[in-house]
Image (tube, rainbow, N blue to C red):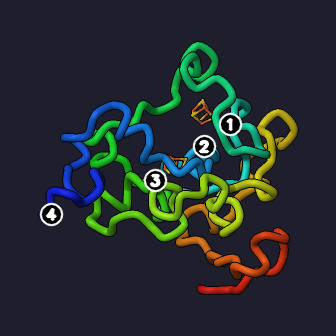
Amino acid sequence: MRQDAPFWKNKSLAEMSKAEWESLCDGCGRCCLHKLRYEDTNELAHTNVACRLLDLGSCQCSKYERRHRYVPDCVTLTPQVLAEIDWMPPSCAYRRVHEGRGLAWWHKLVCGDPDMVHKAGVSVTGRAIDERYAGPLEHHIVEWPGREPRVRRPKPEDDAAGNTTEELS
Ligand code: SF4
Ligand code: SF4
């Protein structure tokens, strides 16, 4: 391993500092969507209903440091927890590094743009519903949070204008 390689290539998740660990989150908000678990089959269903603390514009937790006071069952992600749960989105940076896939091109640590997660169509912005207005979760079952996102790479000449994008996958 090259010594000058970035920390996410040089270190395991367990070896990362708290700051490094926190910086890995791409801010997609996908893990903050509610899931359903069917008791009889243990099958998982994803929904487009967001935790009430998720800011649907920025896709950031609005009370991250104090979130457990409001959402006691919000999972605190650790390397061990990550290895045990089956519902982290396939595009999640932690899951990608855990599985040896590294970070995607649209990750802020790779491209340098913290908004690329939105521009590339990876975040939940524009696609999620606040749990306070959603009604029954069963009415909001969708498959996309459990799939790899269809990413869009902004063309350089269009990125400045903030419009046209090119479909990649
Ligand atoms: S899915 Fe992963 S990368 Fe996205 S917000 Fe959740 S923890 Fe961060
Ligand atoms: S409390 Fe914050 S981090 Fe936890 S699920 Fe809700 S929005 Fe996401």
Marks 2 and 3, the one that precedes in the sequence: 2
Disc 4 marks a residue whose amino acid type is: Arg
Q: Nearer the viewer, residue 112 or 17?
A: 112
Residue 24 on image: x %, y %: 42, 47
Indicate yes or no: mark 3 CB to ligand 1 under 8 Å.
yes
Marks 1 and 4, the one that precedes in the sequence: 4
Q: Nearer the viewer, residue 98 or 129?
A: 98
Q: Residue 140: which quarter of the image?
A: bottom right
**Is residue 76 found left or right of 101 in the rendered image?**
right
- Position of the C terminus, as image quadrant, is bottom right
* Residue identifier under label 4: 2
| Residue 114 higher or lower than 167, as above or below | above
As measured in the structure, the alpha-carbon distance from the residue carrying label 2 to the one carrying label 4 is 35 Å
| Residue 51 higher or lower than 143, as above or below | above
As measured in the structure, the alpha-carbon distance from the residue carrying label 4 to the one carrying label 3 is 29 Å
Residue 36 shows up from this direction: no
Assign a secondary structure to mark 2: helix
Q: Residue 63: which quarter of the image?
A: top right
User: Local crowd at mark 1 within 10 Å, few (<14), some, or many (≥20)?
Assistant: many
As measured in the structure, the alpha-carbon distance from the residue carrying label 1 to the one carrying label 3 is 15 Å
Q: Residue furthest left?
A: 1
Residue 119 shows up from this direction: yes
Are the residues tagged 1 and 4 within 8 Å (C-beta)?
A: no
Disc 2 marks a residue whose amino acid type is: Cys
